[in-house]
Amino acid sequence: MTRLNRIRSHVVLALAVTAVAAPAASAARIDGVTPDARDAGRTVVVDRVSPDARDAGRSAAPIDRVSPDARDHGRREAAPVVLSNPAIVTGDGFHWFDAGLGAAALLLLAGIGSATVRLRRSPVRAA
């Protein structure tokens, strides 16, 4: 079988498959109604009250209008003292492994960059 005959047979096979598949695809029921028209036929309840009006209609929680200075009613009580245990830090705070990874990544990127520049600047050889 020559190359031209092979191409012809592939084209004929593709046309035959298309001819069989096209009627099956067009046999699907098409109602001709767009999705927007389907959505327009549905009834939707729209709440036209703004969020601010909704908040105004709710009963508000009581607000304490007393200043922080007047909460003790002039008794001048000492403020409560809260003691917390400080966090104990171990090590010197410098992570050598992370620094080594960063340096290796920097050297790798520098090597790739210099190789790219070197390849671009190589002289063009005559054929």
Image (cartoon, rainbow, N blue to C red):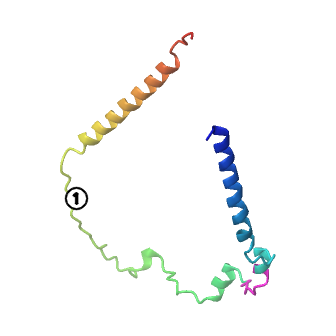
User: What residue is rendered at 64% in x and 44% in y?
Assistant: 6
Q: Which residue is mark 1?
A: 87
Of residue 107 and residue 84, the one placed in the foreground of this image is: 107
Coordinates of residue 66 in the picture (x, y in percent): 48, 80
Residue 68's quadrant in the figure? bottom left
In magenta, the rendered stretch is 39-48
Q: What secondary structure is the magenta-colored segment mainly?
A: loop
User: What residue is rendered at 69% in x and 49% in y?
Assistant: 11
Of residue 63 and residue 1, the one placed in the foreground of this image is: 1
Coordinates of residue 48 in the picture (x, y in percent): 74, 83
- Total numbered labels: 1
In the image, taking residue 119 as reference, residue 30 lies left or right, namely: right
Coordinates of residue 35 in the picture (x, y in percent): 75, 75
Residue 45's quadrant in the figure? bottom right
Magenta stretch encompasses residue 25: no
In the orientation shown, which residue stands out farthest toward the top?
A: 126
In the image, taking residue 61 as reference, residue 24 lies left or right, namely: right
Label 1: how many Cα within 10 Å (few below 14, some 14–19, many 20+):
few
Image quadrant holding the N terminus, namely: top right
Considering only vertical position in the picture, is 87 above or below 111?
below
In the image, taking residue 47 as reference, residue 86 lies left or right, namely: left
Image quadrant holding the C terminus, namely: top right
Q: Amino acid at mark 1?
A: Ala
In the image, taking residue 80 as reference, residue 126 lies left or right, namely: right
**Disc 1, SS:** loop
Considering only vertical position in the picture, is 105 above or below 50?
above
User: What residue is rendered at 67% in x and 54% in y?
Assistant: 14
Magenta stretch encompasses residue 41: yes
